[in-house]
Image (cartoon, rainbow, N blue to C red):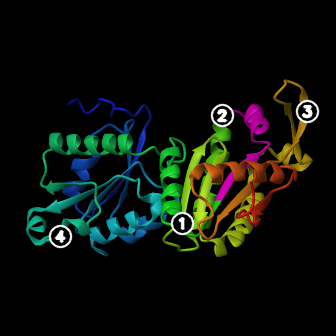
Amino acid sequence: MDSCERIAPFTRQLNGFLLTPRREILEMVSGLWTTDLIAWTIYARGKSAIENLFTDPPDLLVVDSRMPDMPGTDLVNLIKSENVYRQVPVVLCLDAQDLVQCSNWSTIEADDFLIIPCAADEARARLSLTLCRASRSLDANPLSRLPGNTTIIQRIQELIDNRQDFALGYVDLDFFKSFNDKYGFSRGDEALLMTARIIVNTIRSFSCASSFVGHVGGDDFVFILPPDMVEDACRQIIDRFDAIIPNCYDPEDQERGFIRSTDRKGNFQEFPIMAISLAVVLNLDARLKHFGEASQIASVLKKKAKENPKSCYVIDRRDHSSAA
């Protein structure tokens, strides 16, 4: 395989994290593709990489089992234990004796492994297969890399089937289209990525095993938390969004507090700085029977939230047991 060949099915530059103190692994992995195909960020210590892993997850993570500050297997399991980062493909670099010493592979959550020393052709093939397999098996949003519709529906239905109490938050941006129309898709994507990070970091701060964040598409996101945590989460998301979003605008638009753009009918109008709307559906005492019910309730709540031009949240606290 030519090292310059693009990795199917990807048409963009990929970002890889390579965690190793060993020159042998560094030189072998970083030389597999040209930098326009994969740009590697190198870390010699695991702990120095963890924060960046959580704030800006890579497309591929290659971890040396013999990190100087923590076992590579522990780092892999730490990443995979975070629900919102489980989709990151991870390849573990092992020595031959590691294979002999490992008695229970089910405890290691790597997606594949390389035995060091490893021929470049074999390493390239295995990493390519790992990337393609991850792309096929996951419906991650291509922009945010958060789980997409299929995973979102599966997660909601799984909680419903298990009769678990949960709060399902639907998030979207108000006046995003006018921002996109004026500033272009590139800055629109930056605003969406910023929003995704705010939601992910807020939900992650609650340290709940059942938490989840998904990206439906465009400016629509969802998150799941226990019901007793959701109102605090909504407030934090709104506070952080409102504090950061003005920085996405040009200084003169920030100062005015609005932009001039066209509406959906092509009419020239003034639009406020973007706001964020959150609609929260509560599933208590096995109220919901199907994920479609949550979507229907959320659509009503979102209309209510959007009546307020400023960032706000609406939580459905109605008793639906007697509702038609």
Q: Given the image, on which type of amino acid does mark 3 rest?
A: Gln
Mark 1 is on which residue type?
Ser
Residue 208 in sight: yes
In the rendered structure, which segment of residues is drawn in magenta?
Answer: 169-185
Q: Disc 3 vs disc 2: which is toward the camera? A: 3
Q: Nearer the viewer, residue 303 or 176?
A: 303
Q: CA distance from mark 1 to mark 2?
A: 30 Å
The residue closer to the viewer here, 230 or 69, is 230
Spot occupied by residue 98 in the image (x, y as percentages of width and height) = 13, 67
Q: Is residue 184 magenta?
A: yes
Residue 151, horizontal then vertical, whole percent = 48, 50
Q: CA distance from mark 4 to mark 1?
A: 28 Å
What's under tag 2, amino acid-wise?
Phe
| Dot 1 and dot 2 residues touching (CB under 8 Å) | no
Local packing at callout 2 (Cα closer than 10 Å; few below 14, some 14-19, many 20+) is: few
Mark number, residue 137: none
Q: Kindly identify which residue carries mark 4.
A: 104
Which residue is rendered at x = 54% and y = 69% of the image?
164
Q: Please, what secondary structure does the residue beneath circle 1 have?
A: loop
Which residue is tagged 2?
185
**Callout 4 amino acid:** Asn
| Residue in view at x 23 percent, y 29 percent | 2
- Residue located beneath label 3 in the image: 269
Q: Which of the two discs, 1 and 2, sits closer to the camera?
A: 1
Q: Is the Cβ of the residue at disc 2 closer than 8 Å to that at disc 4? A: no
Tell which of 204 and 321 is nearer to you.
321
Disc 3 and disc 2 in contact, CB within 8 angstroms: no
Q: Do residues under tags 4 and 3 come within 8 Å of each other at their CB atoms?
A: no
Query: Which of the 4 image quadrants contains residue 225?
Result: bottom right
Q: Nearer the viewer, mark 2 or mark 4?
A: 4
